[in-house]
Image (cartoon, rainbow, N blue to C red):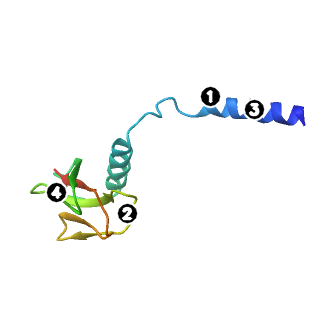
Amino acid sequence: MMPTSCSLLIAILLLQLVIPGNTQLSLDTIVDRKIKKALQGLDLNPAVTTISCSSVTRSGKVSSCPQGMVVTGCACGYACGSWDVQGETTCHCQCGLVDWTTARCCHLT
C-alpha cells in the first residue's frame, strides 16, 4: 500500500511540473482569448480585427451593456442559473431572489 501511495504522490508532483506556469489568468482573460481564437477562423470583413469585452454588474435582476455592445453571457447572484437575454443588450435573471446580475458585453472593432 505504501509504495502505491508514494508512486501516486510522485506522479501528481510531476504533473504539476508539466502544467503551464501561467495559470493565474482571470476568467475574463481566458474567455476573451477563446473568443478571439474562434473569430480567427471566420471570414469576416478585414476591418473587423479586434474584440473588446467587459463585465457590467448591477444590483437586482437586470444588467445592461453600454451602447454599441451586445450581451455574450450572464451571471446571477445567489447561484441563480436561470437567465435570459432581452433585446441583445440586457441580462435578466429569472430567479425569485437575486442580489446582483452581471452582463458580459462585447464589441467588434
Mark 3 vs mark 2, CA separation in Å: 38 Å
Residue denoted by label 3: 9
Q: Quadrant of the N terminus?
A: top right
Tag shown at residue 86: none
SS state under label 4? loop
Residue nearest the observer in this picture, 94 or 107: 94
Q: Amino acid at mark 3?
A: Leu
SS state under label 2? loop
Mark 2 vs mark 1, CA separation in Å: 37 Å
Task: Work out whether mark 4 precedes mark 2 in sequence or the reverse, and give the earlier one.
Answer: 4
SS state under label 3? helix
Name the residue located 9 percent from the left edge and 57 percent from the top edge.
67
Q: Amino acid at mark 4?
A: Cys
Residue denoted by label 2: 80
Task: Work out whether mark 3 precedes mark 1 in sequence or the reverse, and give the earlier one.
Answer: 3
Task: Work out whether mark 4 precedes mark 1 in sequence or the reverse, and give the earlier one.
Answer: 1
Task: Work out whether mark 3 precedes mark 4 in sequence or the reverse, and give the earlier one.
Answer: 3
Query: Badges 3 and 1: C-beta atoms under 8 Å apart?
Result: no
Q: Is residue 18 above or below residue 79?
A: above
SS state under label 1? helix
Name the residue located 28 percent from the left edge and 60 percent from the top edge.
72
Q: Position of residue 66 (x, y in %)?
A: 12, 54
Q: Amino acid at mark 2?
A: Cys
